[in-house]
Amino acid sequence: SQTIHQWPATLVQPVGSPLSLECTVEGTSNPNLYWYRQAAGRGLQLLFYSVGIGQISSEVPQNLSASRPQDRQFILSSKKLLLSDSGFYLCAWSRDRDNEQYFGPGTRLTVT
Amino acid sequence: AQKITQTQPGMFVQEKEAVTLDCTYDTSDQSYGLFWYKQPSSGEMIFLIYQGSYDEQNATEGRYSLNFQKARKSANLVISASQLGDSAMYFCAMGDNYGQNFVFGPGTRLSVLP
């Protein structure tokens, strides 16, 4: 069966510090991968998605970037965090040509 | 552009009763999928049910059913026999057949009362 992992579960970082959130998927190959941020009152906002290694599409311009160094690894990064980067970050995967997305447990980021 | 609307920020239901969570969508695509997810206080997102735009029958999964009215562009979630563990945020979402252009609604917070 497929599983998706995210770490860390919670993170407190000062403004201006770097960020690296990791997401890995097990039990499947060549998944579509997604990073979401949960914004209050707006539901989930898609940040990035990837259909393959090194292929990243950005949905909104922001202070964040994503990378996919391996087939089942998706990393969300920032060089300098802003207060507005605080939130709940969810990683998800889906099979190619299937729509259902399965989510990881999420990372709660607090920027102080 | 695709858009999902959930007009009920919060809902209350008595335990063991049924509840309907509303979802309307807007898209110019002919082929699309509609989804409902549950997010308990722990934060994880749990997939509940899926309806394809060409599916003629409403989707059902246990106590969950999706009332799909294509002409009205609505995809309401019906939870039968509510349980205390159903208390959570519920998100309606829409995506294309390639798992891209995924859009979520703002969510509805359901509270089940004992």
Image (spheres, helix red, strand yellow):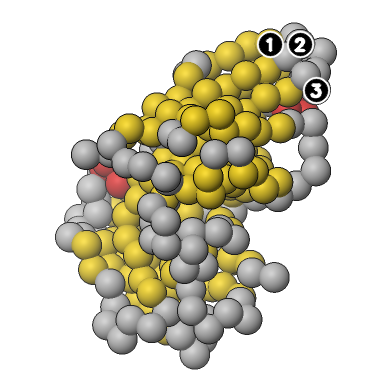
In the rendered image, which residue does mark 1 sit on?
Answer: A13
Mark 3 or mark 2: whose residue is earlier in sequence: 2
Q: Determine if residue B104 is in view.
A: yes
For disc 2, the neighbor class at 10 Å (few under 14, some 14 to 19, many from 20) is few
Q: Amino acid at mark 3?
A: Leu
- Residue A82 disc label: 3
Callout 1: SS: strand
Q: How many marks?
A: 3
- Residue A33 disc label: none
CB under 8 Å between discs 1 and 2: yes
Residue extending farthest to the bottom is B71
Residue B17 lies, in percent from the top left, at 24, 60
Callout 3: SS: loop
Mark 2 belongs to chain: A
Q: Amino acid at mark 2?
A: Ser
Residue B50 lies, in percent from the top left, at 35, 65
For disc 3, the neighbor class at 10 Å (few under 14, some 14 to 19, many from 20) is some
Callout 2: SS: loop
In the rendered image, which residue does mark 2 sit on?
Answer: A17
C-alpha separation, residue under disc 3 versus residue under disc 2 = 9 Å
Mark 3 belongs to chain: A
Residue A21 lies, in percent from the top left, at 57, 22
C-alpha separation, residue under disc 1 versus residue under disc 3 = 10 Å
Looking at the image, which residue is at 61% across and 76% down?
A: B26
C-alpha separation, residue under disc 1 versus residue under disc 2 = 7 Å
For disc 1, the neighbor class at 10 Å (few under 14, some 14 to 19, many from 20) is some
Mark 1 or mark 3: whose residue is earlier in sequence: 1
Q: Is residue A81 above or below residue A49?
A: above
Task: Please identify, in this view, whether the residue under mark 1 or under mark 2 is nearer the observer.
Answer: 2
Looking at the image, which residue is at 30% across and 46% down?
A: B86
Left or right: residue B111 compared with residue A106? left
Which quadrant: the N terminus of chain B?
A: bottom right
